[in-house]
């Protein structure tokens, strides 16, 4: 949870740390020039925080700054764990200057890496799947959904599409949890879908049916999102739905480190990205 109070100090400190850890400059000259860092989604948050402040839209300003603060916190945790892991994420964030669509997935990977480190879970950052927890014999794979001009814009349809696509992978098995960031779609979804997400029993029923219909053997599906409440507290939460075939070792791992809990939602603001 991130609580906004001194926005100016938080903003300056966050930009400075992102510059240091990511090796990116966030510069606009007002005449069409934009540095590499400013062309990334991180750079957009830095820019939009200033724009919202100048417009007097302090709620949206605080959302953008909160996103920067929690990203800095996660990257600092990763840096303390190992420079090599930080460099892995650094390179991917650099690449988002050319392809914004990759940011949503890497942001979830950064979130999970920091969470595993803080929980003192020993893991290896792999590619397919994204995290290997060898001592438990379990895996975590990351994915994301976001708005595009292709396919349905509905939250459930987007989730179904990514589950179906990921279910064709070799690592789709009862020992793997599929983690999906839904922040971008949730930010612009209609009220009924927000209510559906808040009603976890109904959402879990839909996900369970989705697992059956796609013949997916993932042990668990976890939907992640960021959220700013009316008290200016920034949260990262998830809805977890276990498959009927979940491996006992994955169930034990998730119950210990990612227990089923209440998902926070409205009233408030969901950003377009974490």
Image (spheres, rainbow, N blue to C red):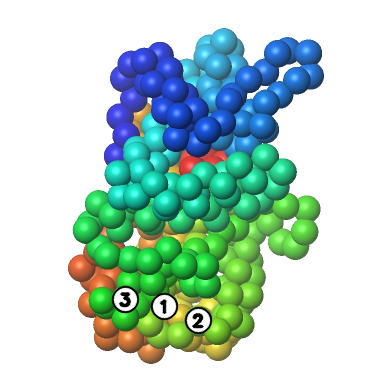
Q: Residue at x 63, y 75 (%)?
A: 165
> Answer yes or no: do the residues labelled 2 and 3 have beta carbons within 8 Å?
no
Is 46 located above or below residue 180 in the figure? above
The answer to whether one can see residue 230 in this image is: no
> Answer yes or no: do the residues labelled 1 and 2 have beta carbons within 8 Å?
yes
Q: Which residue is identified by label 3?
A: 134
Q: Nearer the viewer, mark 2 or mark 3?
A: 3
In the depicted view, which residue is nearer to us: 117 or 267? 117
Q: CA distance from mark 2 to mark 3?
A: 14 Å
Which numbered disc, 2 or 3, marks the residue that appears first in the sequence? 3
Q: CA distance from mark 1 to mark 2?
A: 7 Å
At numbered mark 3, what does the secondary structure look like: helix, strand or loop? loop
Q: Which mark is residue 73?
A: none
Q: Which mark is residue 171?
A: 2
The answer to whether one can see residue 252 in this image is: yes
At numbered mark 1, what does the secondary structure look like: helix, strand or loop? strand
At numbered mark 2, what does the secondary structure look like: helix, strand or loop? loop
Measuring from the top left, give residue 78's x and y in whole percent: 35, 47
Q: Which residue is identified by label 1?
A: 176
> Answer yes or no: do the residues labelled 1 and 3 have beta carbons within 8 Å?
no
Is 238 located above or below residue 174 in the figure? above
Is 118 located above or below residue 35 in the figure? below
Q: Quadrant of residue 76?
A: top left
Q: Residue at x 75, y 62 (%)?
A: 151
């Amino acid at each position: 949870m991130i609580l906004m109070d001194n926005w100016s100090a938080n903003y300056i400190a966050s930009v400075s740390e992102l510059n240091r850890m990511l090796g990116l400059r966030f510069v606009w000259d007002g005449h069409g020039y934009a540095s590499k860092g400013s062309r990334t989604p991180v750079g957009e948050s830095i820019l939009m925080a200033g724009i919202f402040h100048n417009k007097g839209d302090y709620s949206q300003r605080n959302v953008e700054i909160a996103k920067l603060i929690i990203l800095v916190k996660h990257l600092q945790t990763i840096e303390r764990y190992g420079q090599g892991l930080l460099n892995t994420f650094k390179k991917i964030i650099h690449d988002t200057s050319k392809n914004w669509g990759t940011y949503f997935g890497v942001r979830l990977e950064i979130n999970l890496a920091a969470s595993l480190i803080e929980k003192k879970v020993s893991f290896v950052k792999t590619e397919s799947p994204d995290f290997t927890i060898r001592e438990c014999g379990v895996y975590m794979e990351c994915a994301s959904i976001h708005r595009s001009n292709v396919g349905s814009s509905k939250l459930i349809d987007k989730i179904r599409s990514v589950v179906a696509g990921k279910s064709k992978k070799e690592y789709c098995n009862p020992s793997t949890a599929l983690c999906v960031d839904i922040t971008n779609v949730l930010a612009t979804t209609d009220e009924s879908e927000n209510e559906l997400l808040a009603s976890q029993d109904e959402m879990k029923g839909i996900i369970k049916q989705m697992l059956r219909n796609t013949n997916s053997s993932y042990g668990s599906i976890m939907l992640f999102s960021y959220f700013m409440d009316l008290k200016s507290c920034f949260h990262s939460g998830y809805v977890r739905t276990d498959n009927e075939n979940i491996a006992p070792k994955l169930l034990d791992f998730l119950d210990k480190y990612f227990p089923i809990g209440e998902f926070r939602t409205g009233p408030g603001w969901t950003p377009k990205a974490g």
